[in-house]
Amino acid sequence: MNERIRAREVRLIDENGEMIGVMPPVRALDIARERNLDLVEISPTANPPVCKLMDYGRFKYDQAKKENEARKNQKTITLKEIRMRPRTDEHDVEVKTRKIQEFLAEGDKVRVSVQFRGAEMRHPDIGRKLLDGIADVLKGSAVIEKTPSMEGRMMSMIVSRAPGWEPPKKQAASPEKLRSNTTANGKVTETQEATDSSTPPKPALVADANDAAISQAES
């Protein structure tokens, strides 16, 4: 840049990208100074080397800003872990599988591990069967990056989000079938209204003193 350019001649491009011509670097540097710009060698292997007029400080600032923006937009992928035991019941496995899908929806990878203890070490097939079952449930939403393998007392596999998979959106309950009730403590709860119209509502019973007197007279 500037006085450090040692070529005998340079091909000069102005700040707008227009070609000025071939000249000694001293002349190119004079033009740069007249315009309050820097002379920057952008293609040193060309014959002659290509130099451009630019505000080098501004150029470096813009480059740093672009790099910072790119880093901000990058999603940091975290490796989460879900652990279970060979005897984990079916309901807990379903809950943990849904949690795995939540992690995948956030863009994270998940290590799914089965921990063995004592005599359970003699039956690694149970852990493999458990992991294979989870992998079957996750088909379409996950990619198996690391197949189940035994490491010490843990059998693990690693899954990541499948390309193109979108997590299902939660559907809100229909407003026509919901009404708000206020409980004694002031909390609002939602209950489903009855939709069976075959049973008519019972009329309210109203009795006054005259009706009671007529009934006694008739009896």
Image (tube, rainbow, N blue to C red):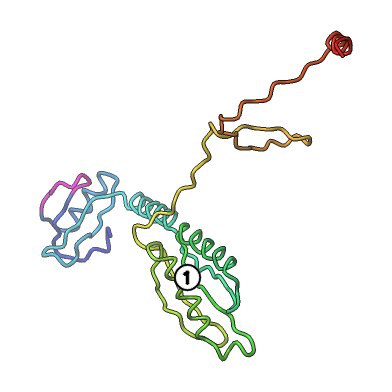
Q: Residue 141 versus residue 24: which sits nearer the camera?
A: 141
Q: What stretch is highlighted in magenta?
A: 14-21
Is residue 54 inside the magenta stretch?
A: no
Question: Which residue is at 73% across, 20% downward?
Answer: 204
Residue located 13% across and 61% down the image: 9
Relative side of 189 to 140, left or right: right
Residue situated in front as seen by the camera: 93 or 25: 93
Q: Percent position (x, y) of residue 94?
A: 54, 64
* Percent position of residue 189, x then y: 67, 38
Q: Which residue, given by chain and number where applicable, does mark 1 sit on? A: 134
Position of residue 120 in the picture relative to residue 22 (left or right): right
Would you call the spot at circle 1 few (<14 residues within 10 Å), some (14-19), or many (20 or more)? some
- Quick check: 24 above or below 158? above
Tell me the quarter of the picture where residue 180 sits. top right
Measured along the vertical axis of the image, is residue 185 above or below residue 25?
above
Which residue lies at the image location 10% right of the left edge and 55% below the top edge?
Answer: 22
Residue 35 is situated, as x and y percent measured from the top left of the image, at 26, 44
Is 199 left, or right, of 131 in this rendering? right
Element type at mark 1: helix
Q: In this view, does 180 lie above or below 146?
A: above
The dominant secondary structure in magenta is: loop
Q: Quadrant of the C terminus?
A: top right
Q: In which quarter of the image is residue 163?
A: bottom left
Residue at position x 69%, y 21% in the image = 203
In the picture provided, is 159 more to the left or to the right than 217? left
Is residue 114 or residue 181 the one in the foreground? 181
Amino acid of disc 1: Ile
The spot of residue 108 in percent (x, y) is 47, 63
Nearer to the camera, 103 or 37: 103
